[in-house]
Image: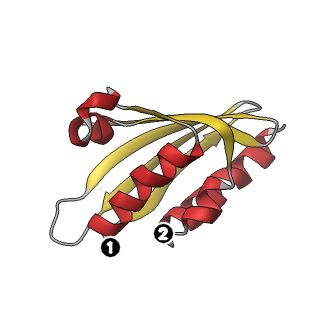
């Protein structure tokens, strides 16, 4: 993969996320992909912040979309190379303060194999 293809995956990721389109979002992930998030660690401590596989991610994001129907991400910066995309964005939800977020997507053979979120 090259950086342009990986950048395209990142743009598709934002489009799917902002449209709360789970099927489109999950189509970008490998079947055995992993996702780490501090919010996951807080809301579901038994996971220690990590979910594995598309179905676990589907459950996590569906709960988030149902709980936060106004959730949107605004891209502020994207950097890609042959194996990874580093994304910075602003998380917005009505009646909550905006949150600055960084996320890394590790990509192999055109699919996200690991995503991890960082925020303060």
For the N terminus, give its image quadrant. top right
Contact, mark 2 vs mark 1 (Cβ under 8 Å): yes
The correct choice, above or below, for 61 with respect to 105 in the image is below
Residue situated in front as seen by the camera: 78 or 95 = 95
Q: Is residue 114 visible?
A: no
Q: Secondary structure at mark 1?
A: loop
Q: Is residue 117 left or right of residue 44?
A: right
| Classed neighbour count for the residue bearing mark 1: other residues with Cα under 10 Å, few (<14), some (14–19), many (≥20) | few
Residue behind mark 2: 20
Is residue 3 among what the camera can see? yes
Q: Is residue 93 left or right of residue 3?
A: left
Q: Quadrant of residue 16?
A: bottom right
Number of other residues with Cα within 10 Å of mark 2, as a class: few under 14, some 14 to 19, many 20 or more: many
- Mark found first going from the N terminus, 2 or 1: 2
Which residue is tagged 1?
69
3 or 58, which lies in front? Answer: 58
Residue occupying image coordinates x 37% and y 65%: 65
Q: Residue 49: x percent and y percent?
A: 35, 31
């Amino acid at each position: 993969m090259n950086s342009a293809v990986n950048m395209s995956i990142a743009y598709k990721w934002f489009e799917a996320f902002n449209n709360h389109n789970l099927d489109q979002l999950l189509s970008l992930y490998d079947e055995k992909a992993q996702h780490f998030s501090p919010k996951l660690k807080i809301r579901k401590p038994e996971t220690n912040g990590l979910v594995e596989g598309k179905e676990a991610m589907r459950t996590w994001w569906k709960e988030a979309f149902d709980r936060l129907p106004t959730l949107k991400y605004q891209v502020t910066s994207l950097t890609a190379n042959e194996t990874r995309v580093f994304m910075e964005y602003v998380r917005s939800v009505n009646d909550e303060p905006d949150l600055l977020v960084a996320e890394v997507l590790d990509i192999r053979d055109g699919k996200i194999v690991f995503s991890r979120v960082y925020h303060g």
